[in-house]
Image: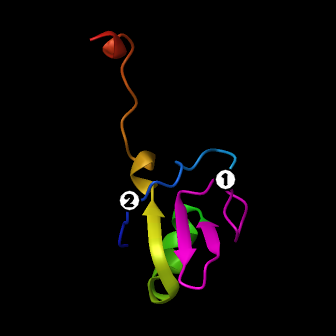
Amino acid sequence: MTTVLTPASPLTAADRCDRCGAQAYLRVVLASGGELLFCAHHGRKFEPELKKIAAEIQDETGRLTAAPASPGEEDH
């Protein structure tokens, strides 16, 4: 999926998928002006259609595979 970094605020746990209600990791800004939020699963499922109608896609799915910091690692 094409990622466009915009000054939009990062997605939080309060942002929910418009399809299933799970935590959203993708924000799709539509060419028509609205926006949709999707979990990683539905973002992948609808990717071909979203690319056709999106002006921007904010993809934060990389956060799902990022390794958490080890204890004490933040101090260095």
Question: What crowding class fits label 1: few (fewer than 14 Cα within 10 Å), some (14-19), or many (20 or more)?
Answer: some
Residue 29 in percent (x, y) is at 54, 72
Q: Residue at x 35, y 72 (%)?
A: 2
Residue under label 1: 15
Based on the picture, tell me whether residue 24 belongs to the magenta stretch. yes
Count of picture labels:
2
Residue 35 in percent (x, y) is at 62, 71
Q: Give the range drawn in magenta.
A: 16-37
Based on the picture, tell me whether residue 36 belongs to the magenta stretch. yes
Residue 51 image label: none
Q: Earlier in the sequence, mark 2 or mark 1?
A: 2
Q: Which residue is drawn at 53% across and 84% down?
A: 31
Of the 4 image quadrants, the one containing the N terminus is bottom left
In terms of image quadrants, where is residue 34? bottom right
Residue 5 image label: 2
Image position of 45 with respect to 48: above or below: above
74 to the left or right of 53:
left
Q: What amino acid is found at the position of numbered circle 1 in the picture?
A: Asp
Image position of 14 with respect to 2: above or below: above
Mark 2: secondary structure: loop
User: Is residue 50 something one can see in this rendering?
Assistant: no
Q: Residue at x 36, y 35 (%)?
A: 67
